[in-house]
Image: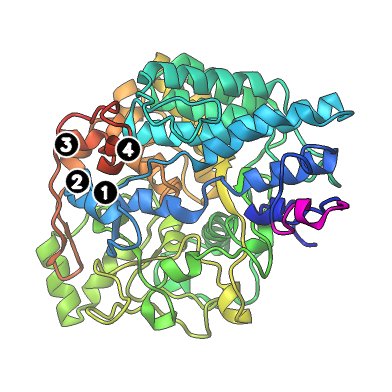
Amino acid sequence: MRKTILYTCTALLMFTVSCSDDFLERPPLDDVSEETFWKTEEDLYKAVNGIYSQLPAEGFIYDDGSSDNAHAQYPWESKATVISAGSIITADDAGWGYEDKRRCNYFLENADAVENADPDLLNRYKAEVRFVRAYSYFRMMCKFGAVPLVTRTLEINEVDIPRTPREEVLDFIVTELEDIAEILPVTYPGGKPHEKGRITRGAALALKARAHLYEGQWQEAVDAAQKVMDLGIYDLFKLDAESDINLEDNYSHWVDFDDEQDKQNFRLGLRSYETLFHEEYEGNSEVILDRQRIAQIDDNFLNTYLPPGTIGGWSSVTPTQELVNSYNSYKTGEPVILPAPEQRAEWYNSGDPAFEEEFRNRDPRLYATVMFPGAPWNAIEDGFVFEWVQGASNMSQTGYNFRKLVDPKIYRENIGNYANVILLRYAEVLLTYAEAKNELSGPDTGIYDVLDDIRERAGMPSVDRNLYNTQEKLREVIRNERRVELALEGHRYMDIRRWQIAPVVMKNIKNLKNTIAQDRVWEDKLYLMPVPQSQMDLSEGVLEQNPGY
């Protein structure tokens, strides 16, 4: 098979059951009983693979839709619409769930029942499962704060489990990740049961670095990120040539190139950034952990959620003007001078060529991330140029669509998108290191170096070390770099909360015509999501609600 590891929830339904003399005592053929399972290493293998399916997938795009980066226009797809509008209520569920944790706990309680299992392999399997559980608790803690910390399978009538203090949940997460980082291998050689794509030491350390960063634990975040960097196996993904179809895109219309070398620098920066998420390059040097997909069985829906209706998409999550504004000048690396919204609308409505000037000479990541009016993309179809069709079915409400994470091969070959979804990548680790180190002790060479590495990969100029020479000035550079580099990967939701800028940035969003795309209201209660009322009722009053709901 093309994929190296099968993540499927149905794995436990595929096992062979033993025979019995009495037909009435035979276990059902579509079920697994305690008597027939937890017997062999193969059982362990299948159980662990089933748990991998509990890792998050492309749903993180809705976390950006809950932020100032994007607009999630369909409330039936996610809670991002009501979260971003500030209208979420206790009847809504923003991600409270224990199914994945229950599966992990069940495995950890029963895995030792397999006799004659290789102890090192068993220990590694447990570490993989503990990572999935820690990841799940981390995501839930980020949304709700204190949550019930359950590390065993509960009885059916155990519903009165109170919320565990947030500090204890955090301590559990980082302690687990630190412990399993010592157990998990740095890499896997391949072949069953050591397939590439399994959870590694780097994944545990990278998630630990993220957790410390989100908590403002700067030294711990620096240390964890440094450990990932010291592994020496990850690097920013770079291409050294464009495909023939990509060469058809005319970026000379959008960028004033100095010479051929300048043009190549821009184009390879754009292509390196956009293709690291495509199926053709999955498992590249930048990937620390991805949620893997099985061809012809387990496709992702990014090619449906993100493109416009004109090419079969739904425009479920679309860029805001504020995200577009954050991409700096390709020529200088500095912020660009932007037209007033009223002026932009006037130019757009009248078809004035001045409208295009806003999109000239911008960070290559803008062209790799956002479809804006006039943007070319021949890889989708010959001669494709994005056009915003306002008000039509499945079209953007902001005037923009996302190009990032959309795999153009799917259109060319008329197939499903089975690209793995990246959950942890090296660029994030470098940005974690840069932010935490700057907050800890201010600018230094190491911070500038990692920022320059990220910008160089994207084709952007280095950071001006003379201009951005204080902690405050460099902080703004790092925050903007996180925004553009990690756009649509789910980080912005927490970034605006931990930086406490949400009250400022979560404002009404408007489209290219300067009319309202979504009304937004911020209240400080939105720093945390409400505990679903259904869970409050189920707990017989034991669970306490977050303030303001």
Which tag is nearer the camera, tag 4 or tag 2?
4
Q: Residue at x 46, y 71 (%)?
A: 304
Mark 3, Cα crowd under 10 Å, few <14 / some 14-19 / many 20+, is: few
CB under 8 Å between discs 1 and 2: yes
Q: CA distance from mark 4 to mark 3?
A: 18 Å
Counting residues from the start of the chain, the first of labels 2 and 3 encountered is: 2
Q: Residue at x 34, y 69 (%)?
A: 372
Q: CA distance from mark 1 to mark 2?
A: 6 Å
From this view, report whether residue 22 is shown above or below residue 112. below
What amino acid does circle 4 point to?
Leu
Residue to which mark 4 is pinned:
538
Mark 1, Cα crowd under 10 Å, few <14 / some 14-19 / many 20+, is: some
Q: Secondary structure at mark 1?
A: loop
What amino acid does circle 2 point to?
Ile
Is residue 327 in view? no
What amino acid does circle 3 point to?
Tyr
Near-viewer residue (190 or 509): 190
Q: Is 297 one of the magenta-colored residues?
A: no
Magenta span of residues? 20-30
Residue 92: mark in rendering: 1
Residue 549: mark in rendering: 3
Q: Quadrant of the C terminus?
A: top left
Residue 89: mark in rendering: 2
60 lies left or right of 23: left
CB under 8 Å between discs 2 and 3: yes
Q: Secondary structure at mark 4?
A: helix
Q: Secondary structure at mark 3?
A: loop
CB under 8 Å between discs 4 and 3: no
Quarter location, residue 508: bottom left
